[in-house]
Amino acid sequence: MADADLKNPPKVVDGNTLVAMCLSRGGVDKMFGVVGIPVTSLANRAVALGVRFIAFHNEQSAGYAASAYGYLTRRPGVLLTVSGPGCVHGLAGLSNAAANGWPMVMISGSSDQSFTGRGDFQELDQIAAVKPFSKFSAKATDITEIPTSVFSVIDWAVAGRPGGTYLDIPSDVLHQTVDESQAQKLITEALNSRNKDFIENPRINYSEIQKAVELLRTAQRPLIVFGKGAAYARAENELTKLVESTGIPFLPTPMGKGLLPDTHELAATAARSLAIGKCDVALVVGARLNWLLHFGKAPKWSKDVKFILVDISKEEIELRKPFLGIVGDAKDVIGLLHKEIKDDPFCLGKTHPWVEAIRNKTKDNVAKMEVQLAKDVVPFNFMTPMRIIRDAILGVGGPAPILVSEGANTMDVGRAVLVQTEPRTRLDAGTWGTMGIGLGYCIAAAVASPDRLVVAVEGDSGFGFSAMEVETLVRYQLPVVVIVFNNGGVYGGDRRNPEEITGPYKDDPAPTSFVPGAAYHLLLEAFGGKGYLAATPDELKSALAESFSAKKPSVINVTIDPYAGAESGRMQHKN
């Protein structure tokens, strides 16, 4: 070896650094997780290469954050976990991404391959553990496999219907090394071999576009239903043009709210039962005919309704068997529908009987709700504080705050009262009805949209799942205001009948009860944030005004009558 080579030996790159290099080259600029053996160095190397790492207390909340980040940005949210138990904790986020159709990559360290099957530290067959929730999984068994593995999980997360993918990196691979020149060569080769074709949106059958337009044109009572799939596709402009050019009423699913403003004159949210019960043709875009839409079946829907189902997944359309299915990206399909209609326009008009029926029913139901909202009820029911919060959020103007909502009664009442005026400004329990998403979603929203205030409206039970992450809010100084509806327990504390209170442990608190009057606002103050206690309208208005103006981590503890609301919210029949 020459003297010059001895003085300047080749720079080496270990597996941790190579993973970080690949993530950066793959477009990842944010990562969520919990560090520890064997991935602490990976996180540090990623930060050094420009990837912002948001460190959590629990992989569950970090996983929820990664899944929501994928939804809000259309780029895979990345979760980093330790091996074994850390991987298992991360499954909460990965499964949530799978259920909601959001792009996410979970990366876990794993035990040394030379000790497989011998009981190594935190040993687990993690590929098998993630299988039910991962649409694609890879394990880098050698440092040379890292680039291809990283780019594959990133690409698969966004291909077709988005979802969660998984990358397993054994600890021995993280400690292997290659020369820097070889690392760059491996990355270049992996980038050049990426198959981007399967990421492209499917080609749309134009004859199906023409059939859909004809069905809408000849319908007597058409309805447009759209969900978070349309929100993910950024289809708001196309939907606005379609709705306003045809005059067809629309119904958003909970997380589709805001694609068109809730206040739009053709919004049918407040006339939902009439809209789905009487429509004869329903164009369903980016929403699955699952439990949220009563499976598209009678008696909620007319037995004769004709569904036009637009979905990115051919398998979804084959499962639901609509009258007409169109495989394609929501934005692309709606754009083509509007183009086809534009060549031969039609519009129902404000005096059309169907439009009038929806409008009149909406006005009637809204007026009834406003009567209830106008009352200042103390001790608080759910309606009074929700009205005050609604008015405070609307008072912010633009950009509108991102709302995070979870709980039973809290989420149900909030869905009806709180108003969404902009796309992707509502995050809730979603397709899976997941409780515990609150703080993770808040952090994801604040990181994805740093120019927006984030407001969480949560039940005390929902808040409890991830309450320790308020420290994370303070640590990163995120503009998040958490409003806790404190009614003393799940659904509101002890709701048992006297005859149910029996047995040897009858003196224990009810399974639904928490400590009465819990001082949740003091939890945040322990970490240097600002806490508020609100039991009256004036106290709540003052807390909202101050916290919204400050845009600093805050918790507002709202005291609710424990007997307000209903057990299981609107899902009593399932409990």
Image (spheres, helix red, strand yellow):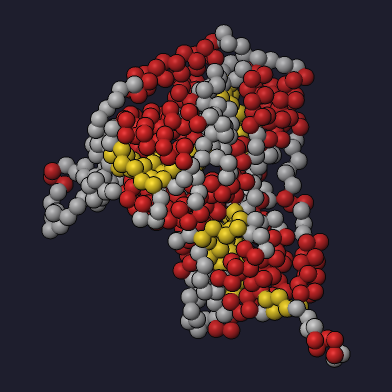
Q: Is residue 311 left or right of residue 85?
A: right
Task: Determine if residue 93 is in view.
Answer: no
Looking at the picture, how far across and down is residue 322, in whole percent? 60, 34
Q: Is residue 313 left or right of residue 36?
A: right
Viewer-side residue, 76 vs 50: 50
Q: State the residue lying farthest toward the right.
A: 2
Looking at the picture, how far across and down is residue 92, in whole percent? 48, 57
Q: Is residue 359 left or right of residue 14?
A: left
Which quadrant is the C terminus positioned in? top left
Looking at the image, how many numbered discs can be counted on the residues? 0
Q: Residue 195: which quarter of the image? A: bottom right
Task: Determine if residue 348 is in view.
Answer: yes
Looking at the picture, how far across and down is residue 502, in whole percent? 13, 51
Viewer-side residue, 285 vs 421: 421
Viewer-side residue, 423 vs 55: 55
Residue positioned 34% across, 21% down in the render: 374
Residue positioned 36% across, 34% down in the render: 542
Residue positioned 80% across, 66% down in the render: 189
From this view, report whether residue 514 is shown above or below residue 297. Answer: below
Q: Residue 565: which quarter of the image? A: top left
Q: Residue 367: which quarter of the image? A: top left
Residue positioned 57% across, 80% down in the render: 112
Q: State the residue lying farthest toward the top.
A: 351
Looking at the picture, how far across and down is residue 14, in whole percent? 67, 76
Q: Is residue 114 left or right of residue 5?
A: left
Which quadrant is the N terminus positioned in? bottom right
